[in-house]
Image: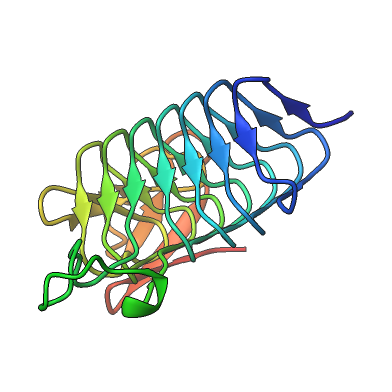
Amino acid sequence: MSVRIQPSSQVDESAELGEGTTIWDLAQIREEARLGRGCIVGRGAYVGPGVRIGDHVKLQNYALVYEPAELGDGVFIGPAAVLTNDFYPRAVDPEGRIKRDGDWEAAGVVVAEGASLGARSVCVAGVRVGRWALVAAGAVVSKDVPDFALVAGVPARRIGWVGRAGVRLVEREGEPGTWECPRTGALHDEKDGTLIERT
């Protein structure tokens, strides 16, 4: 396998692309970005300078991943989803001068292993989306999302739990706090607002 880069994309020569990664039309990969093996970067997607992306990650069309974001293995970023990086965004400083790199502090979003962000969702600077969590389409994530959480809305709030298959978990009858995946049968235990996968 080799890296596949469409001629209309822009990949900085200092970016690192893992074996089997594909960069589609009009995508932009900036300086010092690092993508793992088997990634897919869709049409018009943007990966900022120094962003770290694990193996087998999918960035759908027009997803925007601003630095210094970190995406774990198996992460899915839906079409037109945005990972922001500025707590107090302004084009100019109080004196009206255009802001430059040194005039603000970038705060990256962290998306842990296996998590998915739905189409047009937004993750606000500095939040962490936990392992195998699922952010619904159009949601605005303004605080950390626990592992396996299903969040939706503006602002996003937890409305359930999901397993590795992405299917909403069902609480077992007569076993409060025990959640089961209807697709795989995997069991999870809820305690104090967190969900732990049984091994």
Give x and y (percent) for residue 11. Answer: 66, 39
* Residue 102 picture location, percent across and down: 40, 78
The mark tally for this picture is 0
Q: Is residue 132 left or right of residue 136?
A: right
The foreground one among 137 and 43 is 43
For image coordinates 45% across by 48% down, the residue present is 163
The residue sitting at the right extreme is: 1
Image position of 126 with respect to 3: above or below: below
104 shown above or below 46: below
Decide if residue 151 is in sight here.
yes
Residue lying at 32% horizontally and 61% vertically, measured from the top left: 175
Q: Kindly identify the residue that appears in the image at 26 percent across and 61 percent down.
A: 124
Give the percent coordinates (x, y) of residue 9.
Answer: 60, 27
Q: In which quarter of the image is residue 120?
A: top left
Above-or-below relation of 174 to 13: below
Q: Quadrant of the C terminus?
A: bottom right
Q: Can residue 169 be seen in this view?
A: no
